[in-house]
Amino acid sequence: MKLHFLCWAIKTKSNTATVKGWIKDNFSSHLYIWGIEPTVNRALLFAVSNELVKNIGPDFLITTKGNDLVKAITRDKELYNREREFLSSIGKNKITELQINKLASKFH
C-alpha cells in the first residue's frame, strides 16, 4: 500500500502538496482520497521479472542489479527532479506502513 500511496503522491503537484500538508500536520489532518495506482503492480512485475527486486512475502527488496540501476538514474541530475525533491523531503521512514494502513481503513 505504501508504494501505491507514494506513487499517487508524486503523480501531481497537487497530490504532493496534499501529502506534505498531511505530514506537516503530524498526520492529524484529514486526507480522504488517494488512489491505488495500477501501474505500480505492473512496474513491480517488470522489476521482479528483470531481477531488479525480489518479492519476499508482502515485501519487495532491491537486488544488486536494481541498486545499480538506481545509481545510474541518480547520476543523471535531469531525471525525476520533482519526485526526488519530494522523496528526499519526507525521508525513508517519515510515512510508515501503519500510517498508510490507518489512512486506508478510513475508506472501508
Image: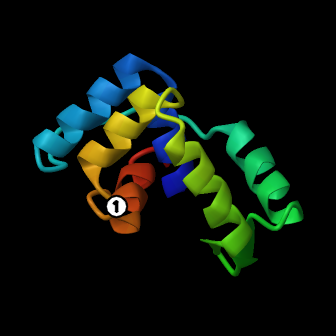
5 on left or right of 93: right
At which x and y percent is residue 4?
Answer: 56, 46
Task: Single out the residue that lies furthest toward the front.
Answer: 75
At which x and y percent is residue 107?
Answer: 46, 44
Using the image as rendered, state which of residue 31 and residue 82 is in the foreground.
82
Give neighbour class at mark 1: few <14, some 14-19, many 20+ (Cα, 10 Å).
Answer: few
Task: Single out the residue that lies furthest toward the right.
Answer: 49
Residue at x 40%, y 38% (from the top left corner): 84
Q: Secondary structure at mark 1?
A: loop
Report how many numbered discs are placed on residues in the image.
1
At which x and y percent is residue 51?
Answer: 82, 68
Type of amino acid under label 1 = Lys
Using the image as rendered, state which of residue 33 and residue 11 is in the foreground.
11
Task: Single out the residue that lies furthest toward the left.
Answer: 25
78 on left or right of 95: right
Residue at x 27%, y 49% (from the top left corner): 90
Residue at x 33%, y 35% (from the top left corner): 85
Identify the residue position indicated by label 1 in the image. 92
Instruction: Locate residue 39: give its quadrant.
Output: top right
In the displayed structure, would residue 94 be above or below residue 10? below
Which of the image's four quarters has the N terminus? Answer: bottom right
Residue at x 59%, y 54% (from the top left corner): 70
